[in-house]
Amino acid sequence: MLIKKLKKMKSRTSITRNLLIILFVSILIAGTSCKKEQQDDPITSVTDRNGNSYKVIVLDEKYWMAENLKSTKTSSGSSITIATSPVQWSTTTACCSWYAYNSTYTYYQDCGLLYNSEAMKKNPCPEGWRIPSSSEWNSMINSLGGTAVAGGKLKSTDNNAYWVNNVGATNSSKFNAYGSGFSNNGNCLGYRSSAHYWTSDMSTREVAANTTGVTIAAGSTSNGYSIRCIKDIE
């Protein structure tokens, strides 16, 4: 009789242990599945500290903003001065401007702000985002076929408002580069003919209307260029 009771208790213990193991494994599988779903859920937009929203794309296994930055707040939350005329453009303190200092023209607004090097260094990107380095820009460009052809894949195909005589533009990357121009020591140049983007290490990447290429150049502390922000895919 005692042996039967012991066998029955042993059987129940075994069943309980097996049930606990099954429950534990089920919880692990559910948690892993939930985590995977969260990781696989792509970011499609991001909002900066001013409340501006930007489309987001995936290029070279990173998130890239598909629009030029318009933020007037640094990573620490302090304000970046908006120059409203060439004489207000600064080469020593963080500053930015709209092309031609015109904040009401819709097409200039679409092209975002031009930032001097001091503003760029303070990272005006949305929280958790950053200005891409030269190597990150280069890697992205190489993923599009290299400097000879990547420009055409980056440029918007809009040949009216944002480009003129736009050669070889396909925008196959969905980067949607506009001819946003640049500021040359406070003088705005190049609208509809070129776009210039900061790297975090003080160089630039340029696309132009008359070529499918991308030009690599040194950034100037007296000039203002556009910014595209990136984020790692976690």
Image (cartoon, helix red, strand yellow):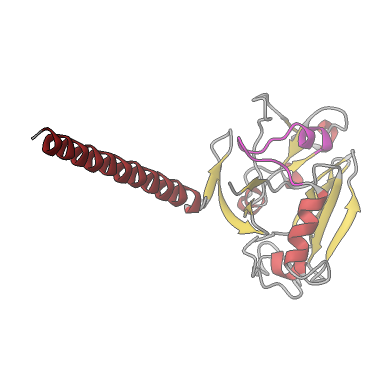
Left or right: residue 172 compared with residue 31: right
Q: Position of residue 90 (x, y in %)?
A: 85, 31
Observer able to see residue 232: yes
Observer able to see residue 191: no
Q: Which residue is nearer to you in this view: 131 or 107? A: 131
Left or right: residue 208 compared with residue 128: right
Q: Which residue is nearer to you in this view: 93 or 40? A: 40
Taken as a whole, is the magenta stretch helix, strand or loop?
A: loop
Q: Position of residue 31 (x, y in %)?
A: 40, 44
Number of callouts in the render?
0
Q: Residue furthest left?
A: 1
Residue depicted at 67% across the width and 73% down the height: 170
Residue stretch rendered in magenta on the structure: 116-132
Residue depicted at 81% across the width and 52% down the height: 135
Q: As displayed, is residue 34 above or below residue 83?
A: below
Quarter of the image holding residue 119?
Answer: top right
Residue depicted at 81% across the width and 38% down the height: 116
Q: Position of residue 35 (x, y in %)?
A: 45, 46
Examine the structure image and report whether residue 208 is included in the region drawn in magenta.
Answer: no
Residue depicted at 76% across the width and 52% down the height: 136
